[in-house]
Image: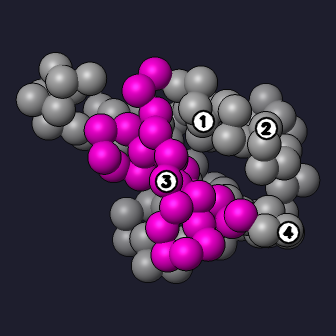
Amino acid sequence: MNIEQLRNFCLSLPHATEDIKWENDLCFSIGGKMFCISSMTEPLTVSFKAGDEDFEELTATNHILPAPYLARYKWVYVQSPLRFSKKEWEHYVRQSYEIIKAKLPKKVLRQL
């Protein structure tokens, strides 16, 4: 997975938007809430929200850490783009998107 593949996949999700935060992070959001954050420079690093069980499982493996500042919300920080296959990347990013989308207020969901 490279930055363009990640970007294309994230933006293919319904109502997903992108912006740059903290000067060097590409953030993907739904309804104004982030579901994926990536570095804009090499090496590519990515953070996303994991499910409760996945968080424990993923952070017990190589190249995945609890995300700085977001670990208490079950976000993981993937240090290597080679850690997952394309199919796995798409699974985890879509799962993050769905978790965030499910927590959006009904008013926001109606506006989307």
Tell me which amino acid carries mark 2: Gln
C-alpha distance separating marks 1 and 3: 12 Å
Label 2, on which residue? 5
Residue 18: percent from left, percent from top: 50, 46
Q: Is residue 78 above or below residue 35?
A: below
Query: Is the Cβ of the residue at disc 4 closer than 8 Å to that at disc 1?
Result: no
Whichever of labels 4 and 3 marks the residue nearer the N terminus, that label is: 3
Q: Is residue 17 magenta?
A: yes
Tag 2, which secondary structure? helix
Residue farthest along the bottom direction in this orientation: 68
Whichever of labels 1 and 3 marks the residue nearer the N terminus, that label is: 1
C-alpha distance separating marks 3 and 2: 16 Å
Nearer the camera: disc 1 or disc 3: 3
Q: Is residue 35 magenta?
A: yes
Residue under the image location 31 percent in, 46 percent down: 32
Tag 4, which secondary structure? loop
Label 1, on which residue? 10
Tag 3, which secondary structure? strand
Tell me where the magenta segment starts and ends, as one range.
14-40
Residue 83: percent from left, percent from top: 85, 54
Callout 4 crowding tier (Cα within 10 Å): few <14, some 14–19, many ≥20: few
- Magenta segment's dominant SS is strand
C-alpha distance separating marks 2 and 4: 14 Å
Residue farthest along the right direction in this orientation: 82
Q: Tell me, for residue 43, which label it has, or none.
A: 4
Tell me which amino acid carries mark 1: Cys
C-alpha distance separating marks 4 and 3: 19 Å
Label 3, on which residue? 19
Residue 37: percent from left, percent from top: 57, 58
Left or right of 30 on screen, residue 62: right
Callout 1 crowding tier (Cα within 10 Å): few <14, some 14–19, many ≥20: many
Residue under the image location 55 percent in, 75 percent down: 23
